[in-house]
Image (cartoon, helix red, strand yellow):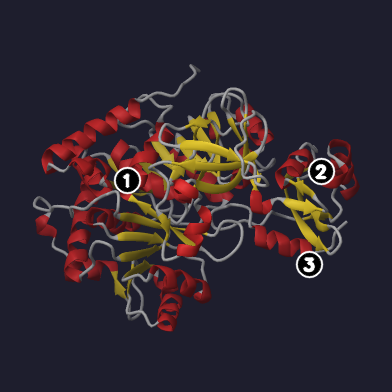
Amino acid sequence: MSEKRINDAVHWFINELSSRVIAESGIPSDRYHLGKLILQSLKDAPDFVMQIDGATGELETNLSALERTIQCAVAFRNFGLKHGDVMVLMAPNHLDVAVPFYAALYLGVIIAAVDRTLGVKELQESFGVSQPKLVFCQSEKAQDIQLALNKLELNTHIVSFDKGDYLFNFADFLEKYGDASVVEDFKPTDFDPEDTIAFLIATSGTTGLPKAAVVTHKNIAITNPYIWVRQFNFPTPTRLAMIGSPLQWLTALINFVISPILRYTRLQTSLLLTSEHAYYLINKYRPSYTIFSPTFMTTLLKPGDREQCDFSCFELIYLGGSAVPKDLLDEIKRLTPQTEVFNLYGMSELTSIGFIPDVSPTESCGKPLGCFRYRLIDPDTQKDVLKPNVPGELWMKGPGIFKEYYRNAEATEETFAEDRWFKTGDMFYRDEHCNYFYVERIKLLLKYKSYQISPVEVENVIRQHPGVLDVAVTSVPDEECGDLPVACVVTRPGHTVTAHEIKDLVKNSLSDSKQLRGGVIFVDEIPVTASTKVHRRKLKEIARTMDKE
């Protein structure tokens, strides 16, 4: 396989597209207007398949999406939804969810994708921040949504994608407010993409209540092409992208935005993505590209199960959302040598990835992007770390950085340093060649007496045991010592692993302060969030309540 290197083909392609958009509108800032870029892209290739629901086999072309999204945008206008209003999307990735998504981008309506597993109390907290005018959902969640809205005394309208008792459904909404005859004459709303909010992305960090990161049209337009700088073929840099995450997760959101622009087909699913369903989708549709969390990828590669699936269809696999173990990268490469596999670092506040994935070394997150400036700051002295291989908190600055936390001035002030340097809260170090390496989330660092402990470092040691399938390290509190590290371990089928073996492995590899003084817990699986990241709060609860060895 010839080695692909970073290049500027994606920017040349998008510049050509945006030039045509600007030529028609006469507004230079439209190069960052996501709605106009998407609308033009749908018109450019009407017969191209935009999306497939792998759960049902349904597919939709650009022409169908063009007609339905314009009808929905007209319905929004007639309903009274306007620039700056908030619309909530709370549904699985079926074909209909893209319709209000793109319609909102045409008009400058703010999209807030919300986790559909939230309960009434959590919905109340979310809606209390976003104050939505309209909520799209499945009928099964309508009652919880209404209860949350009632508690807030919000006059918000609910539209269900499916039919439910006494509910106003999506088809009725389009019929009442839409107009299918105006497709040719439709014009998106003119607005300033630098100030216009495209998305409110829920981000709680590692602790505390969720905050909503304000992401503008310009933020996304600038940062998202960089994910594709290793590709040469535009349009259609990849044949079929498998979307495994819900829409409230950044990786799904940016694929929904960029896929019609770059003209590649999305393979998504209206069902929960279990490992069995993922095997089915991969075997049937043979996707060429995906982004998975390390935890979910580890589950897919579980011995005894992974033989059900042929992963060789993938040309490119990105792993992101949490620390990526080197042995996981190596295992994928052994399983499917022709597939490129990269460690991806990104977060909601960066509005995309933070580094350009590069070929070497494997554990690196990559090299700096052209749209960002970077600093590493010593958390204790608050001075710049200038030497290589010395960890510091990553600070970043540039036009891709999110604008603020929605209606939360205090949190915004805390996260930005002077001159709008964004404090990521993540520890990194860089080598002599400007490759950046993730160390740990600062808030996840454990402190035994005065010693800081990185859970990732301990996890990487434990993963060396041949009988360990997965592991997550947390802690239990101790009045004298602070944090006592606890390892939650999932064993490989057919292997017997003892707590003594795990403790000895750590003892022989790491310093005294990093020992598993809190013990070892054997679990069937590591708890994960809806976006398949390790669920740190539940992990703490396991460590607090379960018997430790």
Where on the picture, by quarter, is residue 145?
A: bottom left
Using a 10 Å C-alpha cutoff, classify the residue at mark 1 as few (fewer than 14 neighbours), some (14 to 19) or many (20 or more).
many
Dot 3 corresponds to which residue? 545
Mark in front: 2 vs 3 = 3
Q: Which is more N-terminal, label 3 or label 2?
A: 2
Dot 2 corresponds to which residue? 495
Task: State the separation of the CA atoms marked 2 and 3.
Answer: 25 Å
Judge from the rendering whether residue 548 lies leftward or rightward of residue 259; answer left or right: right
Using a 10 Å C-alpha cutoff, classify the residue at mark 2 as few (fewer than 14 neighbours), some (14 to 19) or many (20 or more).
few
Q: Amino acid at mark 1?
A: Lys
Q: Amino acid at mark 2?
A: His
Q: Count numbered badges in the picture.
A: 3
- Please tell me whether residue 468 is drawn above or below residue 5 in the rendered image: below
- Please tell me whether residue 115 is drawn above or below residue 525 in the rendered image: below
The x and y percentages for residue 137 are: 38, 67
Judge from the rendering whether residue 281 lies leftward or rightward of residue 40; answer left or right: right
Nearest the eye: 286 or 519? 519
Task: State the separation of the CA atoms marked 1 and 3.
Answer: 47 Å
The x and y percentages for residue 39 are: 21, 46
Mark in front: 2 vs 1 = 1
